[in-house]
Amino acid sequence: MAAIAKTLSDEQVITLFAQIEKENREEIEKRQDYLSLSEKEKKQKRKAQLLESVEEQIGRLTDTQEQIIATYSEQYLSTRDEWINYRETMTNAARRIIATRHINKDFEQQLITLIQNPDTYRSPMYINARAHNAEVMAAMVSELATTLSDEQKHVFIGNIEDVIED
């Protein structure tokens, strides 16, 4: 990827970063919409998103599974602001590196280092929240696993096989 990035024209670089900036603005707008919600609405939205995500992976949920998800959804920490800051920081770092692609003999290594070390660009708060959320997710998945029907197991395995094939 770094070797390909070195061959990008100025126009391609401008187009790439214009698209990233557009996506960043859209994320900020979504965040502003989210911030306008009450705490109760935010919790309901988080729960609904989690329910939908799990249902996509295992199929129709039972009442017990919905309750498990509802309980764990309360424990999640919002990372949206920190994610947006991280994304902007990474974009700016990539822009600085790519701007030197024709004159910097270390260009490829610097771009590889950027890509391979994302935590360098994440705030400590973001890193901690991601770790917390990963622990919450692991606990929820562990508890959900004990409630899966044979049909849900079949759907889940099918989804895993689809990912492996891709």
Image (tube, rainbow, N blue to C red):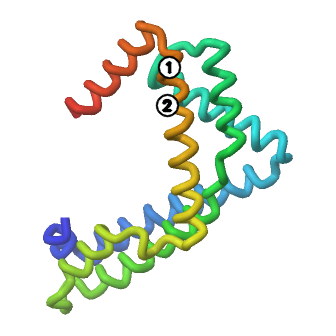
Position in image of residue 23 (x %, y %): 51, 58
Which amino acid type corresponds to the residue marked 2 in the rendered image?
A: Ser
Q: Nearer the viewer, residue 86 or 3?
A: 86
Position in image of residue 25 (x %, y %): 59, 62
Instruction: Check if mark 2's residue and mark 1's residue have beta carbons within 8 Å.
Output: yes
Q: Nearer the viewer, residue 97 or 147?
A: 147
Q: Nearer the viewer, residue 30 or 10?
A: 30
Q: Is residue 159 above or below residue 32?
A: above
Q: Is 103 displayed left or right of 95 in the figure?
A: left
Q: Is residue 56 above or below residue 76?
A: above
Q: Is 5 displayed left or right of 49 in the figure?
A: left
Q: Residue at x 73, y 50 (%)?
A: 34
Q: Residue at x 62, y 57 (%)?
A: 80
Identify the secondary structure beneath mark 2.
Answer: helix
Identify the secondary structure beneath mark 1.
Answer: loop
What is the crowding at mark 1: few (fewer than 14 residues within 10 Å), some, or many (at least 20)? few
- Give the CA distance from mark 2 to mark 1: 7 Å
Position in image of residue 134 (x %, y %): 51, 48
Q: Is residue 62 above or below residue 102?
A: above
Residue pointed to by mark 2? 142
Residue 64, labelled with which disc? none
Residue 146, labelled with which disc? 1
What is the crowding at mark 2: few (fewer than 14 residues within 10 Å), some, or many (at least 20)? few
Q: Residue at x 61, y 57 (%)?
A: 79
Which amino acid type corresponds to the residue marked 1 in the rendered image?
A: Thr
Q: Is residue 100 above or below residue 115?
A: below
